[in-house]
Image: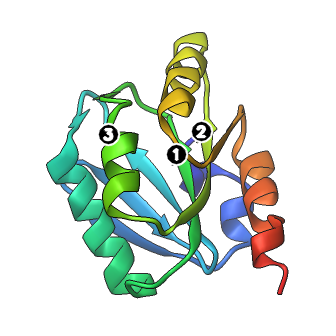
Amino acid sequence: MQFENSQISKQLIYTVKELPFGKIYLFPKFFLSEINYGVHLDWNKIEKIIELVFSYYGVNCKIGYISNKVNSYSYEPNLWKKFHENYDFIIASVAICYSQINYVNATIEKQFSKKSIKRTDNIEDSINWITNLKEFKD
């Protein structure tokens, strides 16, 4: 389910930014991405997301990330390694998986990430988990 079609979208305050390859929703403690159908999410696109995140939260931010996998798109899971070598602002991630292939891909992605990647099947559980991380409880 797209975030804007969910019940929880009506209860939260957020900013949405449209990029040529998807939407990024910015919340106080995390951001959520919805990548467009058929996109190949490469390093250049990831850097566009990072620029957006830094311009919104600042370069010293510590936030969560939710990947709402509503569309089929490709990416290279090993880019998590490159991301962690260059950036360290994501505390934990959630992959919302709507199909078995999404779940398998998220499992592979999890092997490349140095941070926790939780897998869920709905937006509400994902947002609840990420906003209740101990790192946000100060």
Helix, strand, or loop for circle 3? Answer: helix
- Could you give the CA–CA distance between mark 1 and mark 3, rounded to whole angstroms? 15 Å
- State the image coordinates of residue 20 (x, y, percent, origin top left): 18, 54
Looking at the image, what colour scheme do you see?
Answer: rainbow
Q: Is residue 99 left or right of residue 57?
A: right
Residue at image point 30% right, 47% down: 82
- Say which label, 1 or 2, has the lower sequence index: 1
Q: Nearer the viewer, residue 123 or 46?
A: 46
| Residue ID for mark 3 | 79
Q: Is residue 15 left or right of residue 132?
A: left
Helix, strand, or loop for circle 1? Answer: strand
| Residue ID for mark 1 | 67
Q: Amino acid at mark 3?
A: Leu
Specify the label residue 95 is tagged with: 2
Disc 1 packing (10 Å; few <14; some 14–19; many ≥20): many
Q: Are marks 1 and 2 in contact (CB under 8 Å)?
A: yes
Residue at image point 52% right, 12% down: 101
Of discs 3 and 2, which sits in the foreground? 3
Q: Residue furthest top?
A: 100
Disc 2 packing (10 Å; few <14; some 14–19; many ≥20): many
Of discs 1 and 3, which sits in the foreground? 3
- Could you give the CA–CA distance between mark 3 and mark 2, rounded to whole angstroms? 15 Å
- Could you give the CA–CA distance between mark 1 and mark 2, rounded to whole angstroms? 5 Å
Quarter of the rendering occupied by the C terminus: bottom right
